[in-house]
Amino acid sequence: AQRVTQPEKLLSVFKGAPVELKCNYSYSGSPELFWYVQYSRQRLQLLLRHISRESIKGFTADLNKGETSFHLKKPFAQEEDSAMYYCALSKGYGNKLVFGAGTILRVKS
Amino acid sequence: GAGVSQSPRYKVAKRGQDVALRCDPISGHVSLFWYQQALGQGPEFLTYFQNEAQLDKSGLPSDRFFAERPEGSVSTLKIQRTQQEDSAVYLCASSLVGNTEAFFGQGTRLTVV
């Protein structure tokens, strides 16, 4: 069965420190992975998808099929990065998504 | 427009009542998805429409849940005889087609008492 695991409920870092939000998945086919973000009092929005290989707001994520991981990284955290982050896997077609439980990122000044 | 719009934002229902949740997608978006998000969990897929056709309803948890999109625009998720376990945030998302970026609404928080 397809599953997405985000092992940390909360990640707290200081401003300027590196950030790594962990995501592991299980999927029998060729996965398409996403990171979604929800800032306080805002709606869920797409941050990045692995097929586009972009860096958005300084965040990057590399798909590692050997480790079945798609960790989200940023070299220097900023206070405005504080939010809930969800890793998601496309289940069959584009936006039929399986989400992880989410990780709250808190960036302290 | 202003994005995907959902109403009501909050709904309190007594156990056994029927509820209807509305989603106004972005104009021109062909694909529409409903998700259910329980407290402390990520969203879980419920159902998918392409225009007015409901192509996938594999995530609907029981036959008390019913969704429609009769004219290929506005969608309604109906829950009959609500139960406490139905308490959740219900999210709607739309996209131009099935695999382009999905835009989410603010959600409807349903509380069954």
Image (cartoon, rainbow, N blue to C red):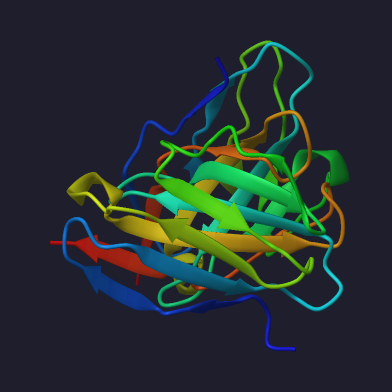
Instruction: Farthest residue to the left: give it.
Output: B113
Q: How far from the left and from the top, in percent, is residue B20?
A: 44, 68
Image quarter where the C terminus of chain A lies is bottom left
B47, above or below B75, in the image: above
**What residue is shown at x 49% (from left), y 39% (from top)?**
B60
**Depth check, front residue: A7 or A109:** A7
Query: Number of callouts in the render?
Result: 0
In the shown orientation, is residue A40 left or right of residue B13? Answer: right
Task: Give left or right: position of B23 versus A101.
Answer: right
Location of residue B9 (image quadrant)? bottom left
Q: In the image shown, does A74 or A45 lie closer to the viewer? A: A45
Q: Nearer the viewer, residue A56 or B17?
A: B17
Q: Is residue A76 visible?
A: no
Whole-percent x and y of residue B23? 59, 71
Q: Percent position (x, y) of residue A30?
A: 79, 19
Residue B71 x %, y %: 78, 69
* Residue ID at (69%, 11%): A28
From the viewer's perspective, is residue A55 above or below residue A21?
below
Instruction: Evaluate whether residue A26 shows in this view.
Output: yes
**Location of residue B18 with respect to B3 vertically, above or below:** above
Q: Is residue B98 left or right of residue B87?
A: right
- Could you tell me which quadrant the N terminus of chain A lies in? top right
Of residues B100 and B22, the one drawn nearer to the viewer in this rendering: B22
Q: Quadrant of residue A26?
A: top right
